[in-house]
Image (spheres, rainbow, N blue to C red):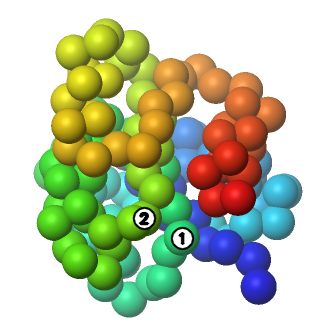
């Protein structure tokens, strides 16, 4: 059974690019347009990993990460922040919220897949 990864980004082009890269590697992909959409979809979809943007309307990546970590059923879910932000303060905020890793956009597909494989095993 292939693993399911949720991608959360308010940019449809980024969701398409991430989704295409993951699907080519054999993963199932669930897309969400922001943190609120991700919350709704996570209540019904079984996901093995979350890749989320940081800056989004309604609920940002840090807020989504905190929500996931506060939910006992997602306690060990790997969370990767995929964002244009590269400042250490933002990275520390992501880590404090419970993010597993951080990838700066623009990214290379091989880089994304290397992180996914490392985290999912």
Q: CA distance from mark 2 to mark 1?
A: 6 Å
Query: Where the C terminus falls, by quadrant?
Result: bottom right
Residue 114 image point, x, y percent: 74, 39
Foreground of the two, 26 or 70: 70
Foreground of the two, 75 or 56: 75
Q: Residue at x 27, y 35 (%)?
A: 94
Q: Which element type, helix, strand or loop, lies under badge 1?
A: loop
Residue 15 image point, x, y percent: 55, 49
Is 9 on the left or on the right of 67, as rendered?
Answer: right
- Residue 20 vertical position relative to residue 1 in the rendered view, above or below: above
Residue 70 seen by the camera? yes
- Residue 75 vertical position relative to residue 73 in the rendered view, above or below: above
Residue 64 image point, x, y percent: 23, 54
Residue located beneath label 2 in the image? 77
Residue 16 seen by the camera? no
Residue located beneath label 1 in the image? 48
- Residue 54 vertical position relative to residue 23 in the rendered view, above or below: above
Is 66 on the left or on the right of 74, as rendered?
Answer: left
Q: Residue at x 57, y 64 (%)?
A: 5
Question: Label 2: few (<14), some or many (≥20) within 10 Å?
Answer: some
- Residue 59 vertical position relative to residue 40 in the rendered view, above or below: above
Q: Which mark is residue 64?
A: none
Mark 2 touches mark 1? (CB < 8 Å)? yes
Question: Label 1: few (<14), some or many (≥20) within 10 Å?
Answer: some
Q: Which element type, helix, strand or loop, lies under badge 2?
A: loop
| Number of disc labels | 2
Query: Where the N terminus falls, by quadrant?
Result: bottom right
Is 22 on the left or on the right of 39, as rendered?
Answer: right
Q: Residue at x 72, y 51 (%)?
A: 117
Quarter of the image for residue 44 reads bottom left
Residue 89 image point, x, y percent: 21, 15
């Amino acid at each position: 059974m292939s693993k399911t990864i949720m991608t959360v980004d308010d940019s449809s082009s980024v969701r398409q690019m991430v989704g295409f890269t993951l699907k080519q590697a054999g993963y199932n992909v669930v897309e969400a347009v922001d943190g609120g959409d991700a919350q709704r979809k996570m209540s019904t979809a079984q996901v093995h990993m979350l890749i989320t943007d940081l800056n989004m309307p309604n609920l940002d990546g840090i807020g989504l990460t905190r929500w996931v970590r506060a939910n006992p059923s997602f306690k060990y879910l790997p969370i990767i922040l995929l964002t244009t932000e590269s400042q250490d303060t933002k990275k520390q905020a992501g880590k404090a919220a419970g993010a597993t890793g951080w990838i700066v956009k623009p990214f290379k597909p091989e880089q994304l897949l290397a992180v996914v494989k490392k985290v999912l095993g």
